[in-house]
Image (cartoon, coloured by chain):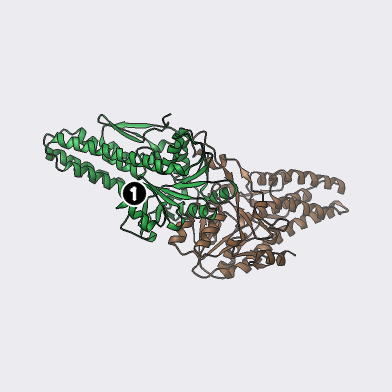
Chain colours: A green, B brown
Amino acid sequence: MPLNLPRTIEFVDGRVRFINQLKLPHALEYVETSDWRRVAEAIRRMEVRGAPAIGVAAAFALALAAYHTRARVVDEAWKELEVCAEELRRTRPTAVNLFWAINRVLEAAKSAGSVEELRRAVVETALEIQRADEEANRRIGEHGESLIGDGDTVMTICNAGSLATSYYGTATAPLYAAFERGKRFKVLVLETRPYLQGARLTAWELHRVGIPVKIITDNAIGIVMQKERVDLVITGADRITRKGYVANKVGTYPLALVAKEHGVPFYVAAPTSTIDLTIERGDEIPIEVRPGSEVTEIYGVRIAPEGVDALYYAFDVTPPKLVSGIITEKGIVYPPFEKNILKVTT
Amino acid sequence: MPLNLPRTIEFVDGRVRFINQLKLPHALEYVETSDWRRVAEAIRRMEVRGAPAIGVAAAFALALAAYHTRARVVDEAWKELEVCAEELRRTRPTAVNLFWAINRVLEAAKSAGSVEELRRAVVETALEIQRADEEANRRIGEHGESLIGDGDTVMTICNAGSLATSYYGTATAPLYAAFERGKRFKVLVLETRPYLQGARLTAWELHRVGIPVKIITDNAIGIVMQKERVDLVITGADRITRKGYVANKVGTYPLALVAKEHGVPFYVAAPTSTIDLTIERGDEIPIEVRPGSEVTEIYGVRIAPEGVDALYYAFDVTPPKLVSGIITEKGIVYPPFEKNILKVTT
């Protein structure tokens, strides 16, 4: 039975169709457009979010620009592409996948000798980026699903789900693969303040597929492991150092610490492109500090007294000693990470 | 300079005046009444909350009933008191302090030989309960303030503040005492989902007093200890076993675990009446499970997909190995708790 999981973003016949994630979990609404500017706007407004999904969206925006160009000569088409790329780069300036995808598409288009060649190179490269994203996720699923047993309870945080990618997700990939193989298990997802991606997005996609899911507050990780059986934790990752330090959504590190205390295996699921070999230690990873107002207001209602601000780090760093393994598209990497990470990256 | 800290609840000349905490942090509004039923309603509606404050409010409700009785004979006045007590018992059935305060007032009134004697016994006992609450908190402050140094950063969770008591608070008592002695320090308070007592109440009272305070999400405990200097954690307690297991607001246990990992002292501030000598282990403490809807809705806005529920334990249990000390009105109790708790309770 195919997974009842809608595609986050698609490119078909010169049109891009994507889920407006701002409407979730209340409504599943698609936006369909042939205008690359609308896709750029979707990235900026976070209708599309999640690093891999942003990369694919940027590639598809360039594909729209090339597909619909009225340029007669290749230089003119190339200039249009550069305008598009420049606007895309300004949408989410910290998203690494965005820049990587843009550069890869431009690189492919560079040597085109005609408008038609450029068009074909751009569209094919964009589609290839989407296929590679999905393929990596499916392999993460294949490698990771063996960790999940029938009747298990799995815990996760934030949305490293299908919605954060073009399809299937990273942390959710082992769940979907296990579910497709007929395993039955349940998931507890941390709501993930302040943006509540766990409650809004991960709960939505798991529920839709038919995987039983319950939400817990981020501070409930302790009592839930004291009171309930939890068999496994799987989270995504934003960046992994060569020694195995994992930067991920704020709250991941306390979750790993509580899991360790209760003997619950803690796995990270991420493609090898997440591994940054240029840095070793966790404190070398820059951690984004965002406006306190994103914490002190919920749906426009202020929760803090006037004059009191919040301190909001968007990510934290989990040290390798708390990580049981890293599920990549090339297999599960086990400790010692310093040695074994190199085996999947070189 | 006196602390700019309004009294949570007062009994003056046959009237009770209390802060309506449902209006905080947006407005400081008082309710003033001579009707004991209005005080019972305030407890039920959580206009007054926090175990010690609820106990004082119940005693004051009985004091209003006795003060304004039109009974001519003592038996009649006693019957009115029993009606009042019965209604109070139904307001928050799990609050231990509520029952304790009601019983203490009734006990004092039992032997009254006249309406006037009953009236005096009830009012004086109620005022004595309030004075004893404040006195215990001030002593907790005196014992605990030495833990705080100039320039320190202190972390706390939920509201074990002045608003949870008649005045001065428990976890906040060392902060207020240190501040009154001229020490300058700052506080980071966890917002404390789902009810946000940290963001709404603790931040409000500290800010009002002039103690610099910032809010963090509950999941930020890890990154904040990775990035910022934190010198001390102080929390309240709902119940402490004779071996030193501490039941407190959900999120306290992960906070203690992260503090231990980072070498940050973790103290619990609570009067000795919080210690339950009848139980030893943490898993003997009943943990209230509340409706998932209290998690899945924030200010009336649903954050979860339709059909997805939350699992909501309201408290967790911190094991004694993570507790540096328990600050009581009789002094700070240090490990081994099994031995030293008996010294302050017997």
The residue shown at (23%, 46%) is: A103
Q: Residue at x 26, y 32 (%)?
A: A34
Q: Report whether residue B255 is seen.
A: yes
Q: Quadrant of residue B3?
A: bottom right
Residue A189 percent location from the top left of the image: 49, 43
Q: Tell me the element at label 1.
A: helix
Q: Position of residue B98 (x, y in %)?
A: 71, 50
Depth check, front residue: A337 or B316: A337
| Residue A90 visible in image | no
Q: Eyeballing the image, is B259 above or below A142? A: below
**How many numbered discs sit on the rendered protein?**
1
- Which quadrant holds the C terminus of chain B? bottom right
Disc 1: which chain? A
The N terminus of chain B, quarter of image: bottom right
Please say if B109 is above or below B37. below
The residue wearing badge 1 is A272
In this rendering, would A58 be left or right of A282? left
State left or right for residue B123 relative to residue B219.
right
* Mark 1, other Cα within 10 Å: few <14 / some 14–19 / many ≥20: some
Comparing B144 with A229, the one in front is: A229
